[in-house]
């Protein structure tokens, strides 16, 4: 005997055929949910924020696609959940970044970005004029510990601006490196985490040689690390 749509197991409570039994879950909806979950990582690393942007766009596209093909596939709620997660990351990631960069800072330091240390276009000077205004001042800067042979209990290391410079690509640019010397008893371990360093900046007029690296122009005598 062949089952028909008007059998009790294939009907909704109001007696209508239950077509959901014959629809498959949209792969796009599952993908939107996965992207949404991954987008939450941008809350901890703002460099991943483009993933949240893509997640929102992909999620909205998926919702429309599922709606147009609702006779064949399900997953609208799954796609909505993924889109909502991406949108949440899109709000929380820059908010957390702003808080960490400009609000959650100790007193007595001037916030400095690696961009202020980069040479100006068309200027032959390696150290730009805009960097000299920080010379001798107590600054606060965020970056990553550049990996060396020693990984734990570091009181002297090189700070670089981004994860790619930290772990890939070999020798960083001269203006992408700051030699940090931590005052006792401060110590750090190498990790993939971003560090906030505070201390007095010194700019060398000539390249200061370092082991395993070409050298640095910028140094920080640090009394704060997070």
Image (cartoon, rainbow, N blue to C red):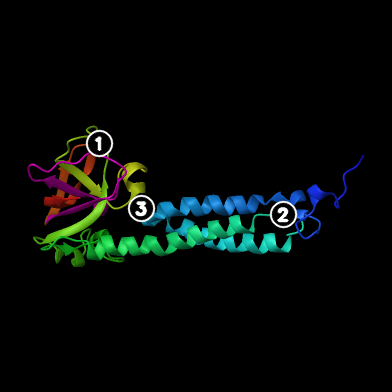
Taking the spot 43% from the left edge, 54% from the top edge, the residue there is 40
- The answer to whether any part of residue 195 appears in the image is yes
Q: Residues within 10 Å of mark 2 (few under 14, many from 20)?
A: some
Q: Position of residue 136 (x, y in %)?
A: 8, 60
Q: Is residue 42 above or below residue 1?
A: below
First in sequence, mark 3 or 1: give its number: 3
Q: CA distance from mark 2 to mark 1?
A: 52 Å
- The answer to whether any part of residue 119 appears in the image is no
Residue at the top extreme? 149
Taking the spot 17% from the left edge, 38% from the top edge, the residue there is 154
Residue at the right extreme? 1
Q: Is residue 119 above or below residue 20?
A: below
Q: Judge left or right: residue 158 versus residue 137.
A: right
Secondary element under disc 1, as helix, strand or loop, is: loop
Disc sitting over residue 73 in the figure: 2
3 and 1 marks in contact (CB < 8 Å): no
Q: CA distance from mark 2 to mark 3?
A: 35 Å
Of residues 14 and 59, the one nearer the viewer is: 14
Task: Determine if the magenta segment contains residue 186.
Answer: yes
* Residue hosting label 3: 44
Secondary element under disc 3, as helix, strand or loop, is: loop
Secondary element under disc 2, as helix, strand or loop, is: strand
Of residues 9 and 174, the one nearer the viewer is: 9
* Residue hosting label 1: 148
Q: Is residue 116 above or below residue 21?
A: below
Q: Position of residue 217 (x, y in %)?
A: 17, 52
Q: Position of residue 32 (x, y in %)?
A: 57, 54
């Amino acid at each position: 005997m062949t089952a028909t749509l008007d059998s009790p197991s294939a009907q909704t409570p109001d007696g209508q055929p239950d077509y959901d039994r014959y629809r498959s879950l949209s792969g796009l909806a599952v993908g939107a949910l996965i992207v949404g979950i991954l987008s939450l990582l941008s809350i901890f690393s703002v460099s991943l924020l483009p993933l949240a942007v893509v997640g929102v766009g992909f999620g909205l596209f998926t919702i429309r696609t599922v709606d147009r093909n609702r006779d064949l596939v399900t997953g609208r709620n799954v796609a909505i959940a993924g889109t909502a997660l991406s949108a949440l990351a899109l709000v929380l990631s820059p908010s957390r970044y702003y808080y960490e960069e400009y609000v959650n800072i100790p007193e007595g330091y001037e916030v400095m970005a690696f961009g202020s240390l980069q040479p100006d276009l068309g200027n032959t000077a390696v150290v730009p004029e805009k960097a000299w205004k920080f010379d001798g001042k107590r600054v606060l800067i965020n970056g990553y510990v550049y990996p060396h042979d020693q990984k734990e209990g570091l009181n002297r290391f090189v700070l670089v601006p981004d994860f790619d410079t930290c772990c890939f690509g070999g020798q960083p640019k001269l203006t992408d490196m700051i030699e940090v010397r931590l005052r006792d008893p401060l110590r750090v371990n190498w990790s993939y985490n971003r560090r906030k360093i505070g201390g007095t900046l010194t700019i060398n007029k000539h390249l200061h040689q370092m082991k395993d690296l070409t050298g640095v122009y910028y140094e920080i005598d640090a009394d704060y690390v997070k």
